[in-house]
Image: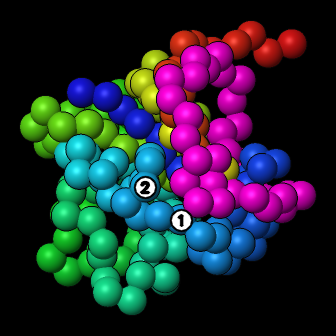
Amino acid sequence: MVTHYFTASSLDGFIATTGHSLDWLLKQKFDEHGPMAYPEFERSIGALAMGASTYEWVLRNDPGGWPYAQPTWVFTHRELPIVAGADIRLTSADIHHVHAEMTAAAAGRDLWVVGGGGLAGQFADAGLLDEVWVQYAPVTLGAGAPLLPRALDLELIDVARNEAFLCGRYRVAGSLPVS
């Protein structure tokens, strides 16, 4: 079982604009059946973690309702709506506790930290983040939500090109000292 952070980023390291927009990402050409594509990755996932902002973005932008069949833990300190029929669990519990719950629910499948970078950083701080997958889009944003606001040592495992995207998969080797 591996805990992944799978996301897209601008070339300058942002996963969303300052206004939480992903319009820059959604207009990019990406082959859903190409290398390091989302559908194949998602089939290996047994449970998800996401922050409140990511959850709210999905609710606002997915016209078909909730897109995930897996149980999902949403880290939040406020009340949020729950999609009827979806296995969504709002939590403000300790990362270690939630990771253990996710692992049990995943039944041997991998875990996915969907977003954002701050939540992935908390998993990394706890020593619970194993891999980082980044699909780099050919745009720069200048500012926004950072990809991963932590100093981490990463080891490149795999690299591919998927249409307009440069895709990298990294193993988390550890934290770097911050000076």
Q: Let me know if residue 165 is in the magenta part.
A: yes
- Quarter in which the C terminus is drawn: top right
| Region in magenta | 137-166
Left/right of residue 30 with respect to residue 16 in the rendered view: left
In this rendering, does residue 115 appear at all?
A: yes
Q: Residue at x 30, y 72 (%)?
A: 67
Q: Position of residue 96 (x, y in %)?
A: 35, 27
Q: Position of residue 88 (x, y in %)?
A: 26, 63
Q: Let me know if residue 85 is in the magenta part.
A: no
Left/right of residue 101 with respect to residue 139 in the rendered view: left
* Foreground residue among 167 and 60: 167
Q: Amino acid at mark 2?
A: Gly
Q: Residue at x 36, y 44 (%)?
A: 112
What residue is pinned by disc 2? 34
Left/right of residue 39 with respect to residue 87 in the rendered view: right
Q: Are marks 2 and 1 in contact (CB under 8 Å)?
A: yes
- Please tell me whether mark 2 sits on a helix, a strand or a loop: loop
* Foreground residue among 24 and 59: 24
What residue is pinned by disc 1? 30
Q: Residues within 10 Å of mark 2 (few under 14, many from 20)?
A: some
Residue 125, located in which quarter of the rendered image?
top right
Q: Position of residue 142 (x, y in %)?
A: 89, 58
